[in-house]
Amino acid sequence: MNYQNLKVVLEHIKKNVRCPHCEVSYPEHTLNIAETFENGALIVGICEKCRKPALIEVMIMSDPRPINKDQIRVKTMKSGPVTDREIDELSRFLQEFNGDFKTLFTK
Ligand SMILES: [Zn+2]
């Protein structure tokens, strides 16, 4: 994902994603980009209010440049302290992901 798209993604997260623990939104400085991929990114949000981390998995449905917000899908997961192993597993998942967003997001 290029820098321009990443900025759109971060904007989207700031406006739409809430902490799964306490429903507070994430200002940009609380978002840590763990990894980016061609069609997605893995972001760790550290909540300002409850201090708990959450994994924010971002998928881009298609890849026009620049992307628009309709193409962003976000999945937020509660998380304890995030280990390197978990980030590894998620990044492997994203790399092998077959692009079937419909199945993924209706689970
Ligand atoms: Zn919180």
Image: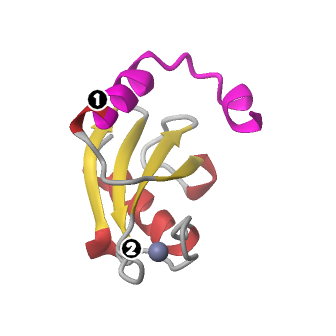
Q: Is residue 62 left or right of residue 101?
A: left
Q: Are circles 2 and 1 on residues that touch, CB within 8 Å?
A: no
> Which residue of the protein is positioned furthest toward the right in this rendering?
106
Disc sitting over residue 56 in the figure:
none
Q: x%, y% of residue 18?
A: 55, 70
Which amino acid type is marked by label 1?
Asp
Examine the structure image and report whether residue 96 is included in the region drawn in magenta: yes
Work out whether mark 2 precedes mark 1 in sequence or the reverse, and give the earlier one: 2
Packing grade of label 2 (10 A; few <14, some 14-19, many >=20) is: many
Neighbour tally class for label 1: few under 14, some 14-19, many 20 plus, Cα within 10 Å: few
Q: Residue at x 36, y 63 (%)?
A: 45
Q: Residue furthest left?
A: 84
- The residue wearing badge 1 is 88
- Which residue is disc 2 drawn over? 47
Q: Closer to the camera, 50 or 62?
A: 50
Q: Main secondary structure of the magenta part?
A: helix
Tell me the residue at 70%/37% (across/down): 105
Residue 27 position, x and y percent, is 37, 78
Can you say which quadrant of the picture contains the C terminus?
A: top right
For residue 99, side relative to residue 42 (left or right)? right
Label 2 vs label 1: CA separation?
22 Å
| Tag 2: amino acid | Cys
Residue placed furthest toward the bottom: 49
| Secondary structure type for disc 1 | helix
The magenta region covers 86-107
Above or below, 44 relative to 63: below
Q: Whole-percent x and y of residue 53?
A: 37, 61
Name the residue located 43 percent from the left edge and 68 percent from the top edge: 11
Ligand 1 is within 8 Å of the C-beta of the residue at disc 2: yes
- Tag 2's secondary structure? loop
